Amino acid sequence: MSSRITQAILLINLGSPDAPTAPAIARYLAEFLSDRRVVDIPKWLWYPILHGIILRRRPARLVPLYEMIWNHDVAPENGAPLKAITQAQASTLQQHLDAHHGAQAFKVYWAMRYQNPAIGAVLQRIADEGIQEVIVLPLYPQYSMTTTETVFDEIDRQIRARGLTLQQRRITEYPTHPQYIQALVQSIQAYWQTHGTPDFAAGDRVLLSFHGLPERNVRLGDPYQAQCNATRHALTEALRDALGVPPSAVHIAYQSRFGAQKWIQPYAMEALTQLAQSGARRVDVLCPGFSADCLETLEEVAHQLKAVFLEAGGAQYHYIPCLNTDSAHIEMMAQLTQVASSNPAIKPQLNQKQP
């Protein structure tokens, strides 16, 4: 089938189980935790732990957490917030691009790195529709080998395995992109207009909570922590300039630690405990490393970390949602993809070999 559209845009996020059930969660965790970019322990050591312990115990424990955030008014496979929001982002981006560039300029697709819709199946659809080039936008503002790079790994694997001739233009990160920072500022301002502004003079604080990463990854050269700090610095300056937030009131922490090894710090639980014990009555938490709300933000950050702060003596805990389908967020995606589409410095890539 031929098409006048020559470029596709592929939005990719992490993934979610197909249903809030133990078997579906086990399938998701098995794929996710078998990725050598995510867990680089030798297979002979890791697989007995993964298959003998984790996949036997953890899925059942996660069922009530997924049930809490699942939309049961739609088909089970569409009930995960991350998938629903990513699909809505793709649809909204398509509408934006059609309005500004015409209906035949680009076609937007979306996929999940783990589970469904699978990257390989979506790439096959793109190729079957006669599109020759795909602009890949992993929805991770800060680059990491454990997130962004594994997306590119899987794309290369699927292109080779399926014998596709798709060319790629890759967007690797955007931790300090001006429109990304401005979108975050606008979302914070909008939240405060509805829920009141923190009293920073009285000790209220803002906490930027990013997904954690083992320290070992950073020692091996992963730039993720440096890019999180860059986002913090840019956002702190923007909040000061736009909303008068004192830079000393903006803190950073990392959540979602998994396993026994040491991860990058400060840990979110400890940071919130320290803020409460030092006199902060209110804390407003947002997650600038997440482009869409998901289990980590809606359950862990919005509920578990709230309990930590309140139990430590805090009085008000506010979770500010991710950018999701905010118009400023979609406009930023549009700008990123347009630059990638027309920039000769971003060269198309074919079937790159795995490291």
Image (tube, helix red, strand yellow):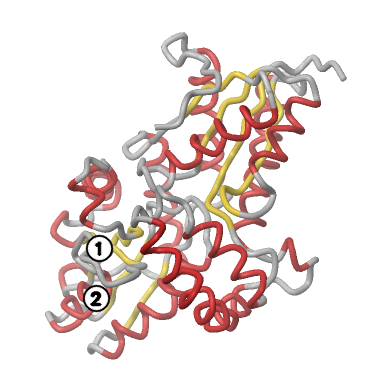
Q: Tag 2: residue type?
A: Leu
Where is residue 346 drawn, in percent x and y?
45, 16
What is the x, y in percent for residue 187? 44, 53
Q: Residue furthest front?
A: 44
Mark 1 — residue? Answer: 253
Left or right: residue 244 compared with residue 183: left
Residue at 70% across, 16% down: 6
Quadrant of image for the C terminus:
top left
- What is the number of the mark on residue 167? none
The residue labelled by disc 2 is 272
Query: What quarter of the picture does the N terminus occupy?
Result: top right
Q: Is residue 223 left or right of residue 91?
A: left
Q: Kindly report the distance in space between the C-alpha atoms of the residues bearing marks 2 and 1.
A: 9 Å
Pointer 2 with pointer 1, Cβ within 8 A = yes
Estimate the x, y position of residue 309 in percent, counting from the top left: 29, 82
In-image side of 133 versus 345 (left or right): right
Q: Nearer the N terminus, badge 2 or badge 1? A: 1
Element under disc 2: helix
Helix, strand or loop under label 1: strand
Amino acid beneath label 1 = Ala
Asked where in the image residue 47 lies, by quadrant, the reply is: bottom left
